[in-house]
Image (tube, rainbow, N blue to C red):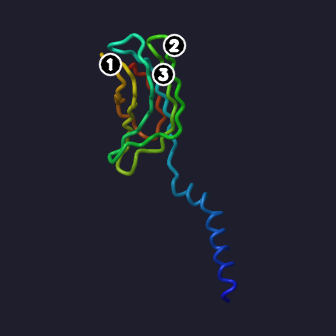
Amino acid sequence: MGRFFPIFLVFLLLQFSIGYPDMESQMMMHPTDYIYFTGQLTCKHLQTPTIQALVLWEHNSVSALFLPFQQLSLDQTVHPYRYDIKARAFGDGILSTDYEFYLDIIHNCSYFIESRQQKIWYQHFNTGENITFNMDIKLE
């Protein structure tokens, strides 16, 4: 009996690990919402600012969530700059039915040309639907 216990234990672990992806996908079935944001970036103080980072976040009632599936296109060749962001979101938590998106931008668009971080908030959007939105942003 003692020799067969480790084999039995390995057998059980294999059974649960093989079925785990199916269990996880059934438990975590959230609708996928496709997000597409586009617009122009201008600067209050400079004609040719440098955008060092541009990341889309979704704010929950508890914390901010990074949207892991993002495609960013940022054209900094001609001012005003153009940005396009494509992302996917999977609902907004248990008690909320709307998305609160914001862009986290690191840029040098300040009077003294020093890098700073700026959050740009979008309007609220309903969950359960695809979102396409155009918004021009003026950095300060």
**Left or right of 132 on screen, residue 20:** right
Nearest to the eye among marks 3 and 1: give it: 1
Disc 1 crowd, CA 10 A, few/some/many (<14, 14-19, 20+): some
* Mark drawn on residue 83: 3
Side of 64 where 74 appears, left or right:
right
Numbered tag placed on residue 77 in the rendering: 2
Q: Amino acid at mark 1?
A: Ser
Mark before the other along the chain sequence, 2 or 1: 2
**If you read the primary sequence from the N terminus, does the residue marked by circle 2 or circle 3 appear first?**
2
Callout 2: few (<14), some (14-19), or many (20+) C-alpha neighbours within 10 Å?
few
Q: Name the image quarter holding residue 46.
A: top left
- In what element is the residue under mark 1? loop
Q: Where in the figure is residue 122, as x and y percent of width and height?
A: 36, 29
Q: Nearer the viewer, residue 129 or 80?
A: 80
On-image quarter of the C terminus: top left
Q: Position of residue 45 (x, y in %)?
A: 33, 13
For the N terminus, the quadrant is: bottom right
Q: Label 2 vs label 3: CA separation?
A: 12 Å
- Mark 3 vs 1, N-terminal side: 3
- Residue occupied by mark 1: 110
Q: Identify the secondary structure beneath mark 2.
A: loop
Query: Looking at the picture, does residue 18 appear above or below residue 42?
Result: below
Other-residue count near label 3 (Cα within 10 Å), few / some / many at <14 / 14–19 / ≥20: many
